[in-house]
Amino acid sequence: MSEIIKLKKEVTQLREKLCESEYGNNDIYVRDKVKGSMAQFPYSAKSFNIGGYEEMSEQCIKKKSEIGAKISKKYDELYIKINDALDYIQEIKDSEIRQILTYKYIDGLRWEQIGQSMTYAAITVRKKHNDFFKSISPNITLNDL
């Protein structure tokens, strides 16, 4: 269950990768610096920055598409796992436990923050959490949570 927060971060990271890499754009911006001289006397040497778009090769476009497809596939897989966790939490009958699990595993709050939101002490919230998991799986240890 604690993996959900990590999965959410990874989903966000993958979404950013897809956006920043512009996997639909097949032009790449290139820059360079060249040396030249002024057109008039004293003809002193000067550096000029130049830039523009260069079309990618077919091989590069193919690789870029493959990378985009892999990222999209992983994004979808992680999103399904997160959705499954949300479904599991929503099926719990006890409203208090649903809130605790949502705050903890979906929103990523600390015990103190959950306690403040629910007007309980942090230790009370954690005890309710642990008691719930022990009730559904008696052999569970605190390290498993």
Image (cartoon, rainbow, N blue to C red):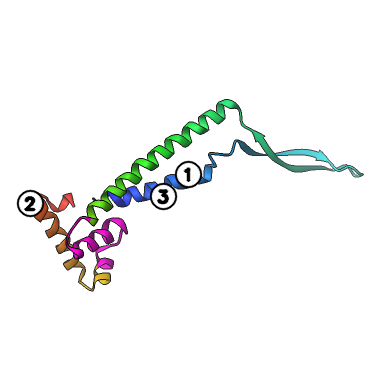
Q: Amino acid at mark 2?
A: Pro
Residue 105 left/right relative to 18: left
Q: Image height check: is 31 above or below 109?
A: above
Query: Dot 2: what SS?
Result: loop
Residue positioned 60% across, 35% down in the render: 26
Q: Quadrant of residue 123?
A: bottom left
Say if mark 1 contacts mark 3, CB within 8 Å. Answer: no
Most frequent secondary structure within the magenta stretch: helix
Q: Which residue is under mark 3?
A: 12
Q: Position of residue 38 (x, y in %)?
A: 86, 43
Q: Which residue is under mark 2?
A: 138
Residue sitting nearer the eye, 14 or 36: 14
Q: Which residue is under mark 1?
A: 17
Part of the protein shown in magenta: 91-114
Residue 19 in sight in this render: yes
Q: Position of residue 136 (x, y in %)?
A: 11, 52
